[in-house]
Image (tube, rainbow, N blue to C red):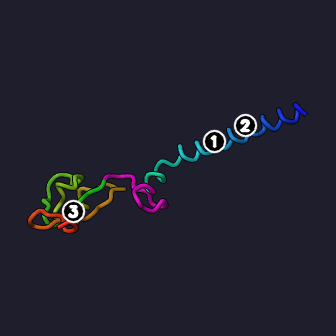
Amino acid sequence: MNTFRLIRLVASIAITLAGLFILFLLLNGSHSIVQAMELGDSPALPHLGSTRYVATTGVDTGDCTNNTAPCRTVQYAVDVASEGDAIKGVQTAKDGKDLKNG
């Protein structure tokens, strides 16, 4: 009876370790998918580059990667962007207030 319990214990430990190892491999090899899911993007198309920001109050200088210093035109953002970059619009009002919060 003691041998049977020992075999069950060893088997349980082996299965648990195998499961943890598989989980580790899945999480370790899928950083871009995990990151994309955290960002709310599609896992099929993970965002791997920089984010370029555009707003009507922006200026077409620099690299547009700071949402407080966006580009003015989408074309300029496309021109400075690299493959894999995202271009996002920033909502602003002329008086500097956030449109959502007034």
Indicate yes or no whether the magenta region holds residue 44.
yes
Q: Amino acid under label 1?
A: Leu
Classed neighbour count for the residue bearing mark 1: other residues with Cα under 10 Å, few (<14), some (14–19), many (≥20)? few
Residue 85 left/right relative to 15: left
Query: Which residue is under mark 3?
Result: 54
Distance from Cα at disc 3 to Cα at disc 1:
44 Å
Camera-nearest residue between 102 and 57: 102
Distance from Cα at disc 3 to Cα at disc 2:
54 Å
Residue drawn at point x = 22 percent, y = 68 percent: 100
Residue 39 left/right relative to 73: right
Residue drawn at point x = 32 percent, y = 59 percent: 86
> Which region shows up in magenta?
37-50
Residue 81's quadrant in the figure? Answer: bottom left
Classed neighbour count for the residue bearing mark 3: other residues with Cα under 10 Å, few (<14), some (14–19), many (≥20)? many
Residue drawn at point x = 18 percent, y = 60 percent: 71
Secondary structure beneath dot 3 equals strand
Classed neighbour count for the residue bearing mark 2: other residues with Cα under 10 Å, few (<14), some (14–19), many (≥20)? few
Indicate yes or no whether the magenta region holds residue 55.
no
Q: Amino acid under label 2?
A: Ile
Q: Position of residue 54 (x, y in %)?
A: 21, 62
Q: Nearer the viewer, mark 2 or mark 1?
A: 2
Query: Which residue is under mark 2?
Result: 13
Q: Position of residue 85 (x, y in %)?
A: 33, 56
Q: In this picture, is 79 found above or below 1?
A: below
Query: Which residue is under mark 1?
Result: 20
